[in-house]
Amino acid sequence: MKIYNTLTRQKETFTPIEEGKVRMYVCGPTVYNLIHIGNARPMIVFDAFRRYMEYKGYEVNYVTNFTDVDDKIIKKAQEEGVEASEISSRYIAECKKDMEGMNVRPATVHPLATEEIDGMIEMISVLIEKGYAYAVADGTVYFRTGKFAPYGKLSHKNPEDLQAGHRDIKVTGELKEEPFDFVLWKPKKEGEPAWKSPWGEGRPGWHIECSVMSKKYLGETIDIHAGGEDLIFPHHENEIAQSEAASGKEFAHYWMHNGFLNIDNRKMSKSVGNFFTVREIAQKYDLQVLRFFMLSAHYRSPLNFSAELMEAAKSGLERICTAAEQIERLQKVSDRKEMTAEEEELYAGTEQFREKFEAAMEDDCNTADAVSAIFELVKYINTNVSAEQSGSYLRKLYDRLKTLCDVLGIRIELKEEVLDGEIEKLIQERQDARKNKDFARADQIRDDLAQKGIILKDTREGVTWKRA
Ligand code: AMP
Ligand code: ZN
């Protein structure tokens, strides 16, 4: 299996530290709001990669964190007049719902930064002892970047250039020794969450969180560290500096970074108004469509999101599901069990698609080509199934299709799912019917929804609903 390693800027053959096992860390979201579709990209593509490695027989220890202490979380908490922990736990729960909708499997562990503070204090203390960090008078602890010689090895930036660039923008009054020294610990500000430490009350910097969580759950050296390409610098560069300075060992062997998701060819931005949360997409589409859309591109390419491309993903996914449905239907009417020699041969003909699929995934997780191989299999199925064929043959074709779709986490099982947007629309229609005294129609809508497992409840504040 080949992986494009940002560290060496080339595709390398993957060799795990321990045979048959993979230790992988993926930087997770900062939880101050519902996740947006950009955040969904690393979740989906690295989940597909994890599934492929498991399909190959690796035991994958997959760790992805939630950053639950951060300026944006604190700001939101202050706006709402609640504790920061209330904001983060709310959005962690919401993020998990979105992950489920996108069929992103829970990680082996989902550590929270706020539950790992002791480990952070410990690593910062080691860095100070070794001369890689220093505390200043106001209680801030900085990493002494200039002392870590390989600094810049991931982003391929030259430390001298970096330093020169920073010098111009040096803020007067800062207590740090050098402009490119970064924060490991920051002192408490009024009204902010804080923890006791040898340097006074305060909270950790963002970078130290991932170094510590990765070490705790995966060890000092891991196989793969991943995230969006915006994290290469400074986040991942700083993680490397902290972890390697503390342990004296290489932090991660392979660094994988996904390209950015743009909307209508522009950077996603709230202020421009081209910004979607995963939840907004769920109003209109089954989130499987969003997943399929993401996997139809190579993870390192920039990906453009548009209504047309989502429609194309929707019909592509439908084509696959229709083929699966067709086999299932034929299987029910098939009255022969045993496979004929001709069917054996036809089934053997599907081997090429499995091979193509695997070759694509072996080549730096090329899900775009893996999806093409599935489409070719679907075409083959559509021309080679009929009611005259044996149940075993049909079953084997179905299993082949399902196995490959499972590797990408694409569900093909028949499922009539009612989307949130449709439910809201029907509830409104029911309210209108009631207003017009058309109680028969109103009751019918309620009963239809109940049949699909949607329970309505009339309350004084209006109609609420839940899935049974
Ligand atoms: P954040 O919450 O900003 O730290 O982001 C969580 C993850 O989402 C990181 O791996 C980011 O690199 C990734 N990410 C954020 N925005 C985008 C985007 N527009 N396209 C792709 N990945 C993104
Ligand atoms: Zn991180």
Image (cartoon, rainbow, N blue to C red):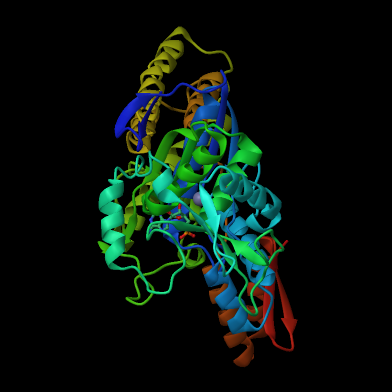
104 relative to 463, above or below: above
Quarter of the image for the C terminus: give it. Answer: bottom right
Residue plotted at (37% across, 54% down) = 230
Q: Who is closer to the viewer here, 42 or 406?
A: 42
Q: Position of residue 436 (x, y in %)?
A: 59, 92
Q: Position of residue 373 (x, y in %)?
A: 35, 30
Residue plotted at (29% across, 31% down) = 10
79 relative to 247, above or below: below
- Which of the 4 image quadrants contains residue 66? bottom right
Q: Who is closer to the viewer here, 459 or 202?
A: 202
Q: Is residue 324 left or right of residue 267?
A: right
For ligand 1, give the image quadrant.
Answer: bottom left
Q: Who is closer to the viewer here, 430 or 316?
A: 316
386 relative to 127, above or below: above
- Which of the 4 image quadrants contains residue 449? bottom right
Q: Is residue 358 left or right of residue 223?
A: left
182 relative to 465, above or below: above
Q: Is residue 49 left or right of residue 439?
A: left
Residue plotted at (39% across, 29% down) = 361
Quarter of the image for the N terminus: give it. Answer: top left
